[in-house]
Image (tube, rainbow, N blue to C red):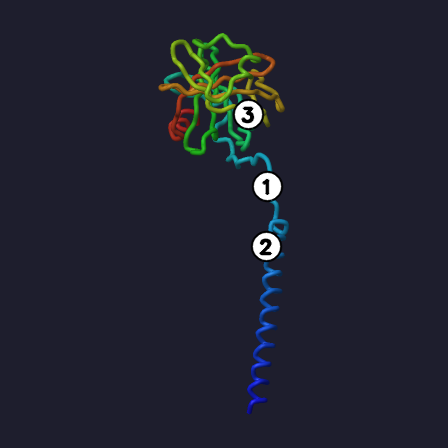
């Protein structure tokens, strides 16, 4: 009886020792798996990601009244807008009114695709060269006449495919730089390259109104 009890105790101890080693090997295997997991996962995409862009909603050559101004769509370009962390494609239309003034009508600039931005040349602007504009950073102040605005974002614009009715616009591959600035009342865009600099004041337009006017 005494021998039987000792044997039982011995078997139980062996089982415990084996269970202990099994737990150690399982822990080691789990540690190795967790260590290697980041290397086994697919690498996350690096760099700017282009957003999908719908087909051009307007036709070059169409005419209508935008912001109470009778104008004609003289040109269209697909433009890549690089914000650093993201590249967003947008449709940019060159509008010309009866006096020959050119405006830009942009679709796809904002996250909300139901909005358009009309960029109107702003004649009360700072005396600034392209090299001076390139030094502006987020938070800097800029005066458009008496209207004080602060720089928000910087951009790099690359002209993609283009179509023009009469006067040719910027060629495919042309690069512009720019920054957006906001005041209490207005949203401004400053755009430049080695050929010069242009200042715009923008206005938000609803999609249904733009399509009804120019289709």
Q: Is residue 203 left or right of residue 50?
A: left
In the figure, 39 relative to 203: above or below?
A: below
Q: Position of residue 57 (x, y in %)?
A: 48, 31
Residue at the image point whose x is 58% and y is 16% from the top: 193
Q: Which residue is mark 2?
A: 34
Numbered label attached to residue 45? 1
Mark 1 burial class by Cα count in 10 Å: few <14, some 14-19, many 20+: few
Q: Position of residue 108 (x, y in %)?
A: 48, 30
Q: Quadrant of residue 182?
A: top left
Q: CA distance from mark 1 to mark 2?
A: 22 Å
Residue at the image point whose x is 55% and y is 86% from the top: 5
Residue at the image point whose x is 60% and y is 38% from the top: 46
Q: CA distance from mark 1 to mark 3?
A: 27 Å
Q: CA distance from mark 2 to mark 3?
A: 49 Å
| Secondary structure under the numbered disc 3 in the rendered image | strand
Numbered label attached to residue 77? 3
Q: Residue furthest top?
A: 127
Numbered label attached to residue 12? none
Asked whether 127 or 108 is in front, the reply is 127
Q: Is residue 160 left or right of residue 100?
A: right
Q: Is residue 168 left or right of residue 100?
A: right
Q: Quadrant of residue 21?
A: bottom right
């Amino acid at each position: 009886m005494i021998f039987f009890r000792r044997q039982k105790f011995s078997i139980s101890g062996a089982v415990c020792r084996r269970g202990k080693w099994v737990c150690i090997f399982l822990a080691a295997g789990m540690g190795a798996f967790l260590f290697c997991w980041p290397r086994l996962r697919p690498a996350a995409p690096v760099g700017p990601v282009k957003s999908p862009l719908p087909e051009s909603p307007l036709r070059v050559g169409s005419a209508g009244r935008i912001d109470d101004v009778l104008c004609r769509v003289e040109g269209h370009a697909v433009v890549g807008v690089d914000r650093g962390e993201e590249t967003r494609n947008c449709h940019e239309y060159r509008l010309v009114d009866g006096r020959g003034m050119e405006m830009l009508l942009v679709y796809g600039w904002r996250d909300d695709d139901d909005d358009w931005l009309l960029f109107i040349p702003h004649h009360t602007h700072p005396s600034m060269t392209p090299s001076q504009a390139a030094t502006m950073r987020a938070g800097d102040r800029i005066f458009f006449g008496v209207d004080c605005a602060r720089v928000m974002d910087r951009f790099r614009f690359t002209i993609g495919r283009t179509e023009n009715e009469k006067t040719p616009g910027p060629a495919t591959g042309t690069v512009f730089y720019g920054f957006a600035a906001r005041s209490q009342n207005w949203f401004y865009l400053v755009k430049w390259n080695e050929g010069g600099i242009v200042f715009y004041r923008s206005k938000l337009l609803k999609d249904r109104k733009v399509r009804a006017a120019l289709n």
